[in-house]
Amino acid sequence: MGMLAKIRRMYFRDKLSIREITRRTNLSRNTISNWLKKEAMQEPRYPPRQVSRLIDPFTGQLRQWLETDSHRPKRDRRTAKVMFEAIKAQGFKGSYVRTSAHVRQLRQALGDAPQRKAFVPLRFAHGEAFQFDWSCEYAWIGGLRKRIEVSHCKLASSRAFWMIAYPMQSHEMLFDAHTRSFQAFGGIPRRGIYDNMKTAVDKVLRGKERIVNARFQSMCGHYLFEPEFCNVASGWEKGIVEKNVQDRRRQIWAEALDQRWTSFEHLNMWVAQRCQQAWESMAHPDWPAMTVAEVLQEECLQLMPMPKAFDGYVAQPVRVSGTSLIHFQRNRYSVPTPYAHRVISLHIYPDVITLIADDLEIARHTRCFERYQTFYQWQHYIPIITQKPGALRNGAPFMTMPEPLQILQKQLLNHSGGDRLMAEVLSAIPLHGLDTVLVAVECALEVGHISGEHISNILGRLKETAPPMLIETHLVLKEEPVANVNRYERLRSIQLENHDVS
């Protein structure tokens, strides 16, 4: 536009010829003539140049992906990085920068450009606060694609983060996530920032007022940090951990979905290693010359020391059935038969459940998150077998006994009275211990003479030959005793003298 104005000034105002204008501007005579023929001051328009780009063969594929993702939730949409890796595997030779720019243009053309909002940047002092949040991810665990709940705990100053995968969101998972995160950080900040999650807030009141869950309040009091809850629908107030959820989903969890895990423990061990590797490699946003791990070392000096781990269980009463089982989350777990038909306390942990009666732990089971499963501990049913020995023939709990006891049971139940004899052998376990009874049973099986008296005789001999208990003491004798049998002769002579006197 500026060149056109310059040519018009030279021709109409300065009265220069087209040849002189051509010499001064290095433009062709035809171009100058065409421009001067136009009465209006209009910028010349030229057809766009047709340029072949490396990404053109993949434009249709990218457009299809964007159209498909527009019907998905935002958390499941593919990023430009994921699309770049996909077309790179198909033979794309270009760079990620060109791919990202092209994807941005396609999104704008499809009307999928995100609505941007403005926020105030936040800054925290060392040891001042941490932010906590949950995210929903997916992983292949035990051969099945499962939905998992991931806890994100991030220090607001050093930006160190810790993630733990759980089967579900519940109070015991929340308590365990805090304990393991604080142990990984090496201390506890003075303030925790949360959204209004149901595991912490029972009811949202007006303004900043909240009715906080009693067990969550107990955990905060144990670790001595003050909980702070964001306003409703104001996730930007804990934007540090919100961004961490997005970043880790694109990095760590995108990689975790491509692998197979045998259990949650196996997955969490790998996630813990990736978190520590990220600390070593990521530059701090406020101090780019330092890594997150280096800033964390400085923040650890300002953190409160880690006390004894909070006993983060959830208690609820349960009734023991007539078959000595309790029901929990559509599964059944056994308890000792003397507690049948009683109401006892169930303590729920992330990985185990314990059963408490009369302030004593009477049973412990590994927690199962599947449904309609029954878990027996066959020793729980030993007391009732002495009264009902016939239940040994089809007793479901006794199918999990050790192999020597199962072999003995098969041989004894083939004879009359064998069930009562087997009940006598099992009743010896609470008295002598399982290991001792197993040794006696193996000895009896080797000899081939199986009877209750024989097994009782072996148990008696094993008990007699058991090594004496060693008692440690700090007392030291000044004079060690000497083995001298002549002392007894001296006593004998004294007795004879007394006899003669009498």
Image (cartoon, rainbow, N blue to C red):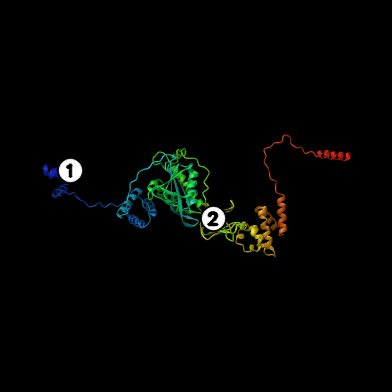
Amino acid at circle 2: Pro
- Residue 181 % position (x, y): 48, 46
Q: Quadrant of residue 159?
A: top left
In this view of the protein, which residue sits in the foreground, 340 or 284? 340
* CB within 8 Å, label 2 to label 1: no
Q: Is residue 6 left or right of residue 369?
A: left
Name the residue carrying label 2. 317
Name the residue carrying label 1. 25
- Residue 480 % position (x, y): 74, 36
Circle nearer the N terminus (2, 1): 1
Of helix, strand and loop, which one carries label 2?
strand
Say which residue appears at 33% left-offset and 46% top-offset: 118
Does residue 54 appear in this view? no
> How far, Cα to Cα, is label 2 from label 1?
95 Å
Marks 2, 1: nearer the viewer:
2
Does residue 387 appear in this view? yes
In this view of the protein, which residue sits in the foreground, 270 or 496? 496
Of helix, strand and loop, which one carries label 1?
helix
